[in-house]
Image: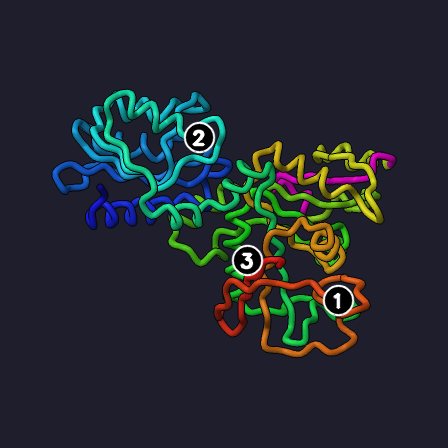
Amino acid sequence: MTTEFDTRMMSRALRLARKGRYSAMPNPHVGCVLVRDGEIVGEGFTQPAGGNHAEIQALEAAGNAQGTTAYVTLEPCSHQGKTGPCADALIAAGVSRVVVAMQDPNPIVGGNGLEKLLAAGVEVECGLLQAEAEAMIPGFIARMRTGRGRVRAKLAMSVDGRTAMASGESQWITGPEARADVQRLRAMSCAIVTGVGTVLGDDCSLTVREQALNLPPAEAALAARRQPLRVVLDSQLRTPPGAKVLDGSAPTLLCHDTQVEPTAELIAAGVDRLPLDRAGSGLDLLAMLDFLTARQSNEILVESGPHLAGAMLQLGLLDELIIYMAPTLMGSSAMPLLQLPLDRMAQKVPLLIEDIRAVGRDWRITAVPG
């Protein structure tokens, strides 16, 4: 039977988990608090991949965990990965009770960690603040349950739904606060997908910039240390060798038509490439997402022009749209938010708006396809 004190400690564990939201990938960010006789004796959160899990961090901080209660936001793992099983570590440390927010959706674990703890005589309770814990790691849950991480499109528009002038000029539609928010979206992502048109038009870097995150210094440094994979859909390999996305500041993958051979300059640049078959009028987007899934990409962010974003929406590949709306008008000659060739009202795409909030002078709208 959980108590109000248990709820407060699990809330603390959830707050700790958030400290790893920019750095734990591909692992889920988890928090752990160890308590003995009503006093916190150790706590921790998931370290960057290959480092300690939250439970190990907390055990090391405690030194002596004999007879403690562990509050963990995700079921302790029971398998050997880059680190040892956390369930075994809790048992060996003499933890007497484990309160878990949610069972691990990873089929390799899937209740095995809880069963191992119970078999060792540890008191186990699961489900405290489960909804809050699930809301923290939606991409990981999606990849475990559906075989594909969460795919979100970031879009910026004027009040009249325009994203760029007819000339292609688009900087800057939104203000600095919205751009900092986008930096944090990037930092939470495993991969950022764009099209070659955006690369040619904007010469974008698609990196996480420490000073632009508007986060506490330690958290910003940790976030910028792990750069997401930059994925450029470039069927004809038109990306110039001097483009910022090939500058080596972050890993880059060029996706191209299987019939197109790279230039000697691209080969010399050593950039990773993924040949893809054609599907409709473009590359096989499903195959691209399958590749990212194989790389354990929990969160995939699409930052592109209206054509790629529209194509992914039409194929049902977008789980969420994050739209930044600026208080400005760009006129009827400017480019639309999405390229969606719809002719009749019956073809309209319904959206469920989940959140609207002010970000500086702009508004951020979070919606899911209905």
The answer to whether 245 is drawn above or below residue 211 in the figure is above
Stretch of the chain drawn in magenta: 245-259
How far separated are the C-alphas under marks 1 and 3?
33 Å
Report if the CB atoms under discs 2 and 1 are less than 8 Å apart.
no
- Dot 2 lies on which element? loop
Nearest the viewer among 268 and 119 is: 119
In primary-sequence order, the first of circles 2 and 1 is 2
Characterize the local packing of mark 3: few (<14), some (14-19) or many (20 or more) Cα atoms within 10 angstroms.
many
Which residue in the protein does label 3 denote?
182
Q: Amino acid at mark 2?
A: Gly
Residue 120 at what x, y percent from top left? 26, 20
Disc number for residue 333: none
The answer to whether 259 is drawn above or below residue 157 in the figure is above
How far separated are the C-alphas under marks 2 and 3?
33 Å
Residue 123 at what x, y percent from top left? 23, 30
- Dot 1 lies on which element? helix
Q: Amino acid at mark 1?
A: Ala
Q: Nearer the viewer, mark 1 or mark 3?
A: 1
Residue 79 in magenta?
Answer: no
The answer to whether 340 is drawn above or below residue 34 in the figure is below
Characterize the local packing of mark 1: few (<14), some (14-19) or many (20 or more) Cα atoms within 10 angstroms.
few
Residue 188 at what x, y percent from top left? 51, 48
Q: Residue at x 55, y 51 (%)?
A: 186
In primary-sequence order, the first of circles 1 and 3 is 3
Kindly tell me whether residue 44 is visible in this rendering: no
Q: Which quadrant is the N terminus positioned in?
A: top left
Residue 248 in magenta?
Answer: yes
